[in-house]
Amino acid sequence: TGAFTFDPGFTSTASCESNITYIDGDEGVLLHRGYPIDQLAEKSSFMEVAYLLLNEELPSKAELENFTYTISRHTMLHEQLSTFYRGFRRDAHPMAIMCGVVGALSAFYHDSTDIADPHQRMIASHRLIAKMPTIAAMAYKYSIGQPFLYPRNDLSYTGNFLRMTFGVPAEEYVVDPVIEDAMDKIFILHADHEQNASTSTVRLAGSSGANPFACIAAGIACLWGPAHGGANEAALNMLREIGTPDRIPEYIARAKNKDDPFRLMGFGHRVYKNFDPRAKVLSKAAGEVLDKLGRNDPVLDTARELERIALSDPYFIDKKLYPNVDFYSGVILSAIGFPTTMFTVLFALARTVGWVAQWNEMISDPEQKIGRPRQLYTGPAKRDYVAVGNR
Ligand code: CMC
């Protein structure tokens, strides 16, 4: 390959040094700043994990209070942005709204785009983490024709988001602790995942010196695809389409058929070749949440049976395909009351923390360069221009 290494899909290229997240795909290990994801999901909170990812260490009690307070002071959106929403068709996919509104933040918060100043970078990061729930909840409210609710800073980060999403002005919304806990866990499990496609997109956009709001909008665009964040929506749609466990073999056969583009959504991962530790936490949580909410969703039985059948099939064993984070998250999100179109939005909300942490890490590196891959050219050799009348 001459002077370059040819690595389409970057399966063996490290694009950066990072001390944020460690993954061992063969062992099913995921650590944030050294802490195992299952411990963080069980014992920590999303605000604490956000602090950890941004600031390298778990916060003290006072640091956590201060951070939570700071984030809560940035939750409001510029009032003019609500006008921006009204420009979207009311049946717009909420991810389309997210791409537009988050990109537009660059115009509203231009005062925090001096990326050479670490203090300014932190303000932009806090603003993004704080405003994402407001933006996401407004996208949902817009799609169902209900009024936007302003954030309430006496509630937790996750409680406030649930209220803005499911509350109405006519009555007090009481946050159900079971739902709040499940939502917070899902946010933790999606907070960061080293150099995945959307994070790499954020880094590449940021490497040119673009402002952080524009970079995160780029990340949202990448996350939207069904091979990445869009898989949670696709996975639940698939499970609902399968409907009952007796139809599973038909779908397994389709997934194995080379001539059929169908894939089991929520299955397989570029890095995890043993199991996805996030899927383990979510599989357990899905059962617990449904039990606690007194729901009996047949989709969970379908998911468990699909997992069992796939994991005993040589095709999936040989290709090392296991359920990923998206396989069980949809069951929980649907029990909470979210439509499938909101699933990827929730992923974007949580991943914003990882995106800003990775962006900050990149910008603060004095050796940082613009990301500029090369290519293997396969087009025509040099030839002379022919006037249009002679072609
Ligand atoms: N169902 C059936 N076959 C599959 C699947 C699947 N879900 N995933 C991979 N394969 C097969 C694929 O056909 C290929 O077979 P062969 O070697 O015979 O051509 C082999 O396994 C390797 O697949 P690949 O596409 O080369 O692997 P990749 O590392 O490029 O792709 C992936 C990883 C996650 C995009 C892929 O597994 C996939 O499309 N899964 C379904 C979508 C999904 O659940 N995505 C969420 C990923 S986790 C969360 C996130 O990152 O957002």
Image (tube, grey):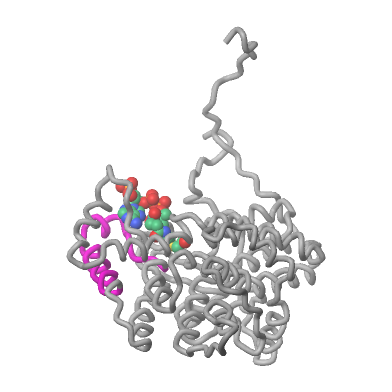
Residue most toward the bottom?
61
Asked whether residue 48 is in view, the answer is no
Task: Residue at 27% x, 67% y: name it.
Answer: 307
Q: Position of residue 112 (x, y in %)?
A: 79, 66
Residue most toward the top?
390
Magenta span contains residue 37:
no
Q: Position of residue 114 (x, y in %)?
A: 81, 62
**Foreground residue, 78 or 83?**
83
Q: Quadrant of residue 308?
A: bottom left
Q: Position of residue 87 (x, y in %)?
A: 64, 58
**Foreground residue, 241 or 366?**
241
Q: Position of residue 10 (x, y in %)?
A: 51, 49
**Foreground residue, 94 or 314?**
94
Q: Quadrant of residue 146?
A: bottom right
Q: Predominant secondary structure in magenta?
A: helix
Magenta span contains residue 305:
yes
Task: Residue at 50% x, 73% y: name it.
Answer: 31
- 298 above or below 234? below
Range shown magenta: 300-325
Q: Is residue 301 left or right of residue 113?
A: left
Task: Residue at 40% x, 63% y: name it.
Answer: 272
